[in-house]
Image (cartoon, grey):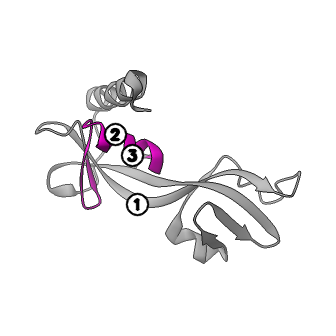
Amino acid sequence: MPQVYVSQVLLDRWVAGGQAYLEGELLRLPPHPGGASVRLHPAVLFERTEGASADPLGLVGTVRATGDLAAMGAVHFDTSVVLADVAYQVKPGYLAVFVGTGGIAALFDPSEWTRLCATLAAMVEHGAG
């Protein structure tokens, strides 16, 4: 299933600005009937290493579900992750999985995907990002 990373900050802006509606772990874009829905799974974006010039594990720039961090042997707290001997600065957020009727993960046909991408781009362009 295609997934998109959405930062916590961006999600908060969308909801506060009325551009999205949060219902449990389901996010509706835009917040009215007929809009697209995504199921949110907590995740982090690895932004940089702390105190190290190199990224020996190759995680900078990647997104990992928070549930996977423990399986990797990582310790996660707020905006930090420590894995092996490397500390990382991370950005909290979510992996968004697009869902259809009934909240079941779904693949969109190309026209729906294009419409959803245009909706997200407009939300960011008009001050929501």
Q: Position of residue 6 (x, y in %)?
A: 45, 46
The residue positioned 33% from the left and 26% from the top of the image is 114
Q: Decide whether residue 17 is among the magenta residues.
A: yes
Amino acid found under the numbered disc labelled 2: Trp
In the image as oriented, which residue stretches furthest toward the right?
53
User: Residue 84 vs residue 122: left or right?
Assistant: right
Q: Is residue 57 left or right of residue 40?
A: right
Query: Which residue is labeled 2 in the image?
Result: 14
Task: Using the image, tell me which numbered label, if any, was put on residue 11.
Answer: 3
Side (left or right) of 36 relative to 11: left
Mark nearer the N terminus (2 vs 1): 2
Q: CA distance from mark 2 to mark 1?
A: 17 Å
> CB of mark 2 within 8 Å of CB of mark 1?
no
Q: Give the magenta part as a residue range.
A: 4-27
Q: Which residue is mark 1?
A: 41
Mark 2 vs mark 3, CA separation in Å: 5 Å
Q: Earlier in the sequence, mark 1 or mark 3?
A: 3
Vertical comparison of 73 with 89: above or below: below
Examine the rendering and report whether any part of residue 107 can be seen: yes
Q: Amino acid at mark 3?
A: Leu
How many numbered circles does the render carry? 3
Name of the residue lying farthest toward the front = 16
Give the farthest residue toward the left: 33
Q: Residues within 10 Å of mark 1 (few under 14, many from 20)?
A: some
Which quarter of the image is occupied by the C terminus? top left
